[in-house]
Image (cartoon, rainbow, N blue to C red):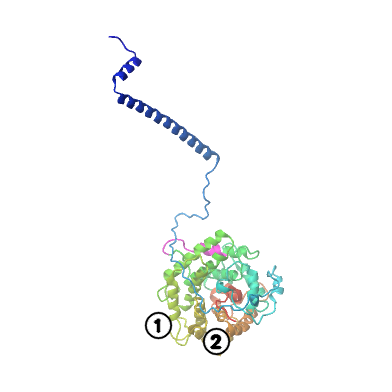
């Protein structure tokens, strides 16, 4: 048999096969060739992409988003409270004059440039008639937006609200003494070193001193006091418990808890350094969360938690109010509801408020200090000054000019602090009469020379023996800062 070559064999097979089989074989061959070509092209493209990625990774770093927050290991995240309720401002009287009526020119326009310039700047003529009190919708906030034109705002507010000459200079001297008295390493103020007996209140006194600086508009970048404020804020943050059941606790009494939370709330808005400001905000939120975790339904506090102590409760309410004004802090709605319960229960039928109230109702009697605390917190929580409770408490406090006789002593710093805020917010004759007495009385008690120049003495101060000269000086400065620390919450003509 004749041997066929492969090509001859293929031709012979094709001649014998049906036409449809031939077509099928041709199509199959073409498909195989097409797949091989596509695979080769895809493989080449993949190789090019891999090579490109390797070269890009080698020559150009990957553009990652910037990490802006400090990360701390082994620290649980803070729980997220409910959104803060809106704070309404009832009894606000809209301004009906023209734009020109509301304009007041001040000289010098930008405030004092140096300490010596305070002499000239502080002695501006007193304005007895002012068309408008307040700054519109921001009235009642912490200096109406902390940090914006602080010196100019102090100048305007002082002139409008009757701040006597030398007040700013004397307050400045008080802050200078506080700076000198601060422990430069820890950033705290030693209570015992300056005549106080409650050595467990170092953090609380540091909070009061911080509030005095912040109330004057001082931030961490102030040329003379910036380092003082920065170290004080860092000390309070370091003292706060960061984990466990006591997260947010500053380690002393509830007095300290309210004071430090209040100071850090203000610092969270005022400080210039963004990292320190963020730390202050987290610490303020933690302090507030701890306060609210201890607040009972009736709203009152004691030295260590729930209770019926009006003095302790006053500082917690001021801390809650400061957190509300700080905007980025979250205050749950129940905080205001429980605070309102406290304000209702702590007032007797005569409108006085005693040192301790009855959570079951039926509170009786009252003291000047605690009634001043109750009236101040009422006003700061938005009660109209013409309402029955505010008007009744203001009348109770001022009957027979008892408040002026206490003010003349110039030594009850706790009373002067709360009463100044209360009378300032009540406005009108309440403020005019009070302002004529409390300011000169306080300034007359200030030490004028010697190593303690600028401070206030302990004599005559019941709480001074506990907190020492740092307490008396900080509280005196806070009382004198009332002209510009909190703008009036209500307008009047």
Image height of 71 relative to 106, above or below: above
- Numbered tag placed on residue 398 in the rendering: 2
Residue situated furthest front in the rendering: 19
Residue situated furthest top in the rendering: 1
Q: Nearer the viewer, residue 216 or 95?
A: 95
As measured in the structure, the alpha-carbon distance from the residue carrying label 1 to the one carrying label 2 is 25 Å
10 Å neighbourhood of mark 1: few (<14), some, or many (≥20)? few
> Where residue 98 sits in the image (x, y, percent)?
63, 77
Quadrant containing the N terminus in the rendered view: top left
Point out the tag, 1 or 2, that comes first from the N-terminus: 1
Residue at 59% from the left image edge and 65% from the top image edge: 229
Residues shaded magenta: 232-245
State if disc 2 and disc 1 touch (CB < 8 Å). Answer: no
Visible in this render: residue 219?
yes
Q: Nearer the viewer, residue 127 or 113?
A: 127
Whether 166 is among the magenta residues is no
């Amino acid at each position: 048999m004749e041997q066929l070559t492969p090509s001859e064999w293929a031709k012979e097979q094709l001649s014998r096969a049906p036409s449809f089989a031939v077509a099928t074989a041709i199509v199959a061959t073409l498909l195989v060739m097409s797949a091989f070509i596509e695979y080769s092209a895809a493989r080449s493209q993949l190789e090019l992409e891999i090579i490109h990625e390797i070269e890009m990774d080698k020559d150009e770093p990957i553009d990652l988003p910037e990490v802006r927050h400090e990360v701390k290991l082994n620290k649980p995240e803070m729980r997220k409270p409910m959104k803060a309720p809106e704070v309404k401002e009832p009894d606000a009287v809209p301004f009906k004059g023209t734009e020109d009526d509301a304009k007041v020119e001040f000289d010098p326009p930008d405030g004092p440039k140096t300490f010596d310039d305070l002499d000239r700047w502080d002695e501006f003529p007193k304005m007895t008639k002012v068309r408008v009190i307040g700054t519109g919708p921001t009235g009642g906030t912490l200096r109406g937006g902390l940090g914006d034109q602080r010196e100019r705002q102090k100048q305007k507010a002082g002139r409008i609200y009757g701040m006597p000459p030398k007040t700013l200079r004397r307050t400045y001297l008080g802050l200078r003494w506080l700076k000198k008295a601060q422990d430069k390493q820890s950033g705290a103020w030693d209570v015992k070193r300056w005549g106080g007996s409650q050595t467990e209140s170092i953090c609380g006194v540091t909070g009061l001193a911080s509030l005095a600086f912040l109330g004057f508009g001082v931030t961490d970048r102030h040329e003379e006091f910036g380092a003082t404020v920065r170290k004080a804020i860092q000390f309070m943050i370091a003292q706060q418990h960061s984990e466990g059941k006591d997260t947010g606790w500053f380690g002393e009494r509830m007095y300290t808890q309210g004071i430090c939370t209040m100071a850090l709330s203000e610092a969270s808005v005022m400080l210039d350094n963004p990292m320190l400001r963020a730390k202050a905000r987290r610490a303020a939120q933690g302090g507030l969360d701890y306060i609210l975790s201890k607040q009972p339904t009736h709203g009152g506090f004691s030295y260590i938690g729930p209770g019926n102590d009006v003095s302790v409760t006053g500082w917690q309410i001021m801390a809650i109010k400061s957190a509300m004004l700080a905007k980025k802090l979250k205050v749950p709605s129940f905080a205001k509801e429980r605070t309102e319960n406290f304000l209702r229960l702590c007032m007797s039928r005569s409108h006085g408020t005693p040192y301790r109230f009855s959570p079951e109702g039926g509170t009786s009697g009252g003291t000047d200090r605690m009634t001043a605390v109750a009236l101040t917190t009422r006003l700061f929580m938005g009660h109209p000054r013409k309402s029955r409770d505010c008007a009744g408490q203001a009348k109770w406090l001022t009957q027979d000019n008892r408040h002026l006789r206490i003010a003349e002593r110039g030594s009850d710093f706790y009373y002067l602090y709360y009463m100044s805020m209360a009378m300032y917010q009540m406005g009108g004759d309440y403020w005019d009469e009070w302002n004529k007495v409390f300011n000169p009385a306080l300034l007359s008690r200030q030490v004028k020379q010697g190593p303690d120049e600028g401070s206030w003495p302990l004599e005559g101060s019941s709480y001074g023996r506990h907190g020492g000269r740092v307490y008396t000086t900080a509280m005196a400065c806070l009382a004198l800062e009332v002209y510009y620390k909190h703008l009036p919450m209500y307008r009047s003509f």
